[in-house]
Image: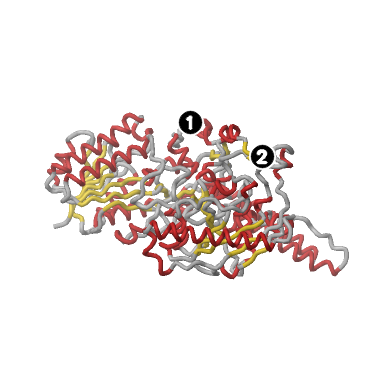
Amino acid sequence: MGRVVLVTGAARHLGGLMVRSLVRDPSVDRVVGVDVVPPRRPLLGAEFVRADIRNPVIGRVLGSAGVDTVVHMGVIATPQQAGGRTAMKDINVIGTMQLLAACQKSESVRRLVVKSTSSVYGAGPRDPALFTEGMTPKHPPTSGWAKDSVEVEGYVRGFARRRPDVEVSILRLANVIGPRVETAMTAYFTLPIIPTVLGFDARLQFVHEDDAIAALHRAVTASATGVFNIAGDGVLALSQAVRRTGRPTLSVPGALLGVVGRALAPTRLVDFSNEQVRFLTYGRAIDTSRAQRELGFVTKRSTSAAFDEFLAGHDLSPGLVTGILDGAASLVSTRGAAHA
Amino acid sequence: MPDARIIPLDPSAHRAESVDAHSEEGFLDFLRRRLTGDYTVDDFGFDADLTDHVLIPPLRPLYERWFRVEVRGVENVPSTGGALIVANHSGTIALDSVMTQVALHDHHPAHRHLRMLGADLVFQTPFLSALARKAGHTLACMPDAERLLTSGELVGVWPEGFKGIGKPFSERYKLQRFGRGGFVSAALRARVPIIPTAIVGAEETYPKLGNIAPLARLLGLPYFPVTPTFPWLGPLGMIPLPSRWIIAFGEPVHTEDLAEEADDPMAVLELTDAVRERIQQSLYRLLVQRESTF
């Protein structure tokens, strides 16, 4: 008998991609998507249940469909997506508690895959160059999505202790990027003027949206369990990434980044919380060797390639700079020819 | 200046002109890479392109003309694979580490990049933090040290830290305590040789006579140095004295057979002491051989 997979957060972009990816998998019989809001595009081949995971109703969905695998992607990254920080915190933390409570009661659930984020490692000057899964954060996150994710992981660990028969995987994804996904980081890199922190150059890592989905899918089908870092190979310096966009930058002292950033982007999805400012100051990179070794998962695109696909999707390029340099180069060569 | 042009006065000057145009093109290529973000940095943020073309060149006059650094025992540094350079630290600001980086880049046959392990303070400080990462340095912590060494990099540590560079001039060339020996366990685990290195000359660049502690506390610095010229001469006082330097790379201490001792604190501390002692002996020897300070 094939598997029955429940995906939370299915109405959003990544959740929708995950549902579609599972629908294409012949070893999966049924896919049930759950979210608070209806999906923007119909989830062909899957069932969709509009349910608030903050309500106990989720338990009935698990039971009636005979779900054996739960993929939890319902943690929201920015307050704008939820309609305020309070609602966001509710969906993230209370939602996860309800979901795990339902899983604990369920007799059919055998596997739980949780999409988490590398931001649980925090960001700061005393960080090692690369975080491995076992390291304790030197600067634990204190607010927002990162803090929610730390709490979510805590509840998941608690669940794993209470139901040792359920296989649990947590995937800590680097910033997901790509031509279509919309996140605080994609909004940041599409600002007309990009504010950066003066005197610091954060190391960034990205994972392409398709690679992120492939990793989560692998965690559904693989036998390995545990915590896995997922990121594209290599890192980009923030200054380097910004230059690839061709957009002008405005470097301001870290303490002013929040104010300047919010002034430059009053209505956008961009996040200039203290947590994000720390990230844009110190950056963060993760070691993905455990995922390669135990999960057998390697991202198809490096950090740099994933970022370039994002740029291509948004028609961003350092065109003006290239044009000026081309002009200068032709000037040099014609002058060289004239002298020869 | 790369864009400075030679105006040909006679046909024999044409060669110079074409070479010059070539370097203009090279410079434009470099500019293109930099301005469009088309270069790679490693996981630590090391930007080899920038280090070779922008960060090291301005240090060369300081290295060659000001300090007239003499390098000894460069053959003790392997051309490939991981190794750990351990050296004495002195001179109020850490010029000695930067000069060692230039020495290994310019005067080692394999032109090796030295990846240094730096203090927390470096990575908290604006500009210095970004500069240090781009030049290939990282925080002195066990995971980073092991990662660099096992991936075959040449790593530099100055285990005396601020105790070394901030010691008064009266204690010059007396090695301070060598931390907790973390660098030794990292080398043991990575099975790479330890190269005890002695640097003579850096002590005299900024003879630290005193310390204005309240000012240091105010600025969040480990000390606020008083030298014969600083702060009396203002910015002029920041010019280092032109002492003559010797950087001597000593015989490597091989660790291949000692890997299991990495978790034995006694063995680690003994080896730490042995390395310290070799650097101290080497310093005394070099000081006797040195003909003049300047």
Q: Is residue A249 left or right of residue A293?
A: right
Contact between marks 1 and 2 (CB within 8 A): the answer is no
Chain letter of the residue carrying label 1: A
Residue that appears at 27% across and 49% down: A19
| Secondary-structure class at tag 2 | strand
Residue located beneath label 1 in the image: A266
Nearer the observer, A151 or B31: A151
Q: On screen, B36 above or below B126?
A: below
Q: On screen, A37 above or below B207?
A: above
| Mark toward the viewer: 1 or 2 | 2
Image location (x, y in percent) of residue A49: 21, 40
Residue located beneath label 2 in the image: B226
Chain letter of the residue carrying label 2: B
Q: Quadrant of the C terminus of chain A?
A: bottom right
- Labels 1 and 2 in the same subunit: no
Q: CA distance from mark 1 to mark 2?
A: 49 Å
Query: Does residue B30 appear in this view?
Result: no
Q: Is residue A232 left or right of residue B133?
A: left
Image location (x, y in percent) of residue B267: 40, 60
